[in-house]
Amino acid sequence: MNSRVITITSGKGGVGKTTTTANIGTALAIQGRKVVVVDSDIGLRNLDAVLGLENRIVYDLVDVVEGQCRLRQALIKDRRLPELYLLPAAQTRDKNAVTSVQMEQLCQQLRQEFDLVVIDSPAGIEQGFRNAIVGADEIIIVANPEMASVRDADRIIGLVEAAGKPEPRLILNRLRSEMVKRGDMLDVTDVLEVLGIDLLGIVPEDELIIVGTNKGEPIVYDKRSRAGRAFLHAAQRILGEEVPLEEVTEAPSLLERLRRLMGFGPTLAEKQVRY
Amino acid sequence: MSIFDFMSGKKKPTPGEIAKERLKVALVQDRIKVNPELLELIKAELLAVISRRLDIDEQHVQLTMAREERWDKLQANVPIKRQKVAFEWGPPAHTSSITGVYGKVRVEVEREQ
């Protein structure tokens, strides 16, 4: 079986790893794959809440690796999608409760059951991060278009490289196109140029994310949400589909349209963006 | 780039551009541990070599490290003072006559503008 283990990480905290994991995992299951999302942020579990499964947890990841329960007992079935499961993190332990060897074995076990294993990494570059990537075939880095996040992402790229993993791909999260247009925010092309990795998706800042998290519903279900569509497209790209990058701007302003009409400067669509 | 850059012809860097430039430098320093002192040392040595042959404007020499297109680059911007610099080069004395280069190489550097 050709299972894939994909780890979602970032270095910096608060950039949207858990949101990305929940949405990519859900989107992959919507695409008909059998998926498990794994919360490896031991001691600070949150993926369960984003998926609305927080009150169903009996056993967790640490129980599984310590042999307190069988894997199937710890897996929580999604409320909507029959092919989506969550393996929750332990809340009462710390990040050193699991070793890299145990984590690698767990990944092997999950491969037997699922097409795709999507692991939510904790922030930081310590043991928890190393555990999260040890069993991964692919790494996805989530970054926001701001200095601290991009700098940490670069550090992660170096560590992923040193761990002998293939070059990670980037999801640029929380892009605010009106700020980019004003020149007040790093643009996609800037971040790609600086980091030198391939792009998997651009996710615009979207208030509906918070609304979704409040309800325990991933945003990919919400047809109105541009962030939801962006996550869906990123998942399709993970599955090897060619999906054009979503237009990250709002409808162009009159001035912008005039500028394009007169042929000044590249339009956003013309800018070279690799993914 | 906005339309106003086009109209005014010159522009101040935007906060986004400043962030990009700062990042480029910071990332190279993070990655290969080149600090400003080392850069100054390289600059001094580079100037010593170049100024043996060319009359350069040492005040305006810029040496920067930046990450571009997947490469960490050392970029030197060395303005040359004189309008035209020429010199002739013969084979070094120790070059054997069999494999040696005969004749002279002439190099001319013209200042831009």
Image (cartoon, grey):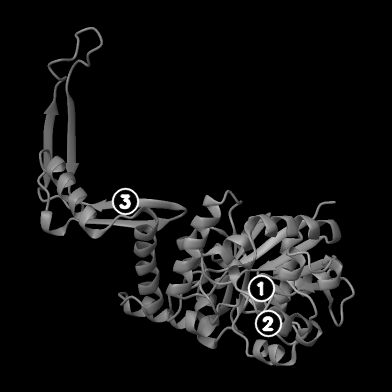
Question: What distance separates the C-alpha of mark 2 from that of mark 1?
Answer: 9 Å
Q: Nearer the viewer, residue A237 or A88?
A: A88
Q: Quadrant of the rendered structure where residue A4 is?
A: bottom right
Query: Badge 2: how crowded within 10 Å, few (<14), some, or many (20+)?
Result: many
Residue A171 seen in render: no
Amino acid type for the residue under numbered disc 2: Arg
Q: Secondary structure at mark 2?
A: helix
**Image disc number at residue A226:** 2
> Which residue sits at x=18%, y=41%?
B109
Query: Badge 1: how crowded within 10 Å, few (<14), some, or many (20+)?
Result: some
Where residue A189 appears, as percent x and y from the top left, is 50, 66
Q: The residue marked by circle 3 belongs to what chain?
A: B
Amino acid type for the residue under numbered disc 1: Glu
> Which residue sits at x=72%, y=66%?
A118
**Image disc number at residue B74:** 3
Residue B8 position (above or below residue A190): below
Q: Secondary structure at mark 1?
A: loop
Q: The residue marked by circle 1 belongs to what chain?
A: A
Q: Is residue B113 left or right of residue A197?
A: left
Q: Nearer the viewer, residue A106 or B18?
A: A106
State the residue position of label 1: A246
**Cβ atoms at labels 2 and 1 below 8 Å apart:** yes
